[in-house]
């Protein structure tokens, strides 16, 4: 096949599809690619959200002995304590409650 025949074949193909059709076809390909990227990103986001939810439901543990912390209802603060007495962990509300009790000792 000669070089001229290849040129003619390309020209015939170009005559078969107008520039408008090429543009629409190219746009469709871009749309499909964007849809696939969006689908992948959505799937990845869902996986990350599930990992975050799984972490949130994990019971808190003592950083020293790795035992599960237990709620300290004995003192009325709502904090968590290590069963091996390695420490206590309080929420901000529990700290405010304790400070209020210290400031007003008779109001219990």
Image (tube, rainbow, N blue to C red):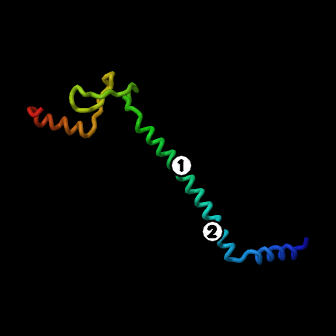
Q: What element carries label 1?
A: helix
Name the residue rendered at 24%, 39% in the picture.
Answer: 93
Name the residue rendered at 37%, 27% in the picture.
Answer: 68
Q: Quadrant of residue 98?
A: top left
Q: Neighbour class for label 1 at 10 Å: few (<14), some, many (≥20)? A: few
Q: Is mark 2 on a helix, strand or loop?
A: helix
Name the residue rendered at 33%, 23% in the picture.
Answer: 83
Name the image quarter holding the N terminus.
Answer: bottom right
Can you identify the residue that label 1 sits on? 44
- Vertical comparison of 54 with 37: above or below: above
- Vertical comparison of 56 with 63: above or below: below
Q: Quadrant of residue 79?
A: top left
- Vertical comparison of 14 with 64: above or below: below
Q: Nearer the viewer, residue 7 or 15?
A: 15
Name the residue at the left extreme: 106
Horizontal arrangement in the rendering, residue 56 relative to residue 46 (left or right): left
Horizontal arrangement in the rendering, residue 54 relative to residue 29 (left or right): left
Name the residue rendered at 66%, 73% in the picture.
Answer: 23
> Which x, y percent locates residue 46?
50, 47
Horizontal arrangement in the rendering, residue 16 relative to residue 23 (left or right): right
Give the distance between the C-alpha atoms of the residues marked 2 and 1, in whole angstroms. Answer: 26 Å
């Amino acid at each position: 096949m000669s070089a001229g025949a290849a040129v003619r074949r390309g020209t015939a193909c170009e005559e078969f599809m107008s520039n408008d059709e090429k543009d629409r076809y190219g746009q469709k390909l871009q749309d499909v690619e964007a849809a696939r990227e969006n689908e992948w990103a959505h799937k990845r986001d869902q996986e990350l959200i599930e990992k975050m939810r799984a972490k949130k439901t994990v019971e808190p543990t003592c950083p020293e002995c790795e035992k599960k912390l237990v709620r300290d209802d004995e003192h009325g603060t709502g904090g968590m304590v290590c069963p091996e007495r390695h420490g206590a962990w309080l929420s901000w509300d529990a700290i405010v409650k304790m400070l209020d009790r210290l400031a007003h000792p008779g109001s219990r």
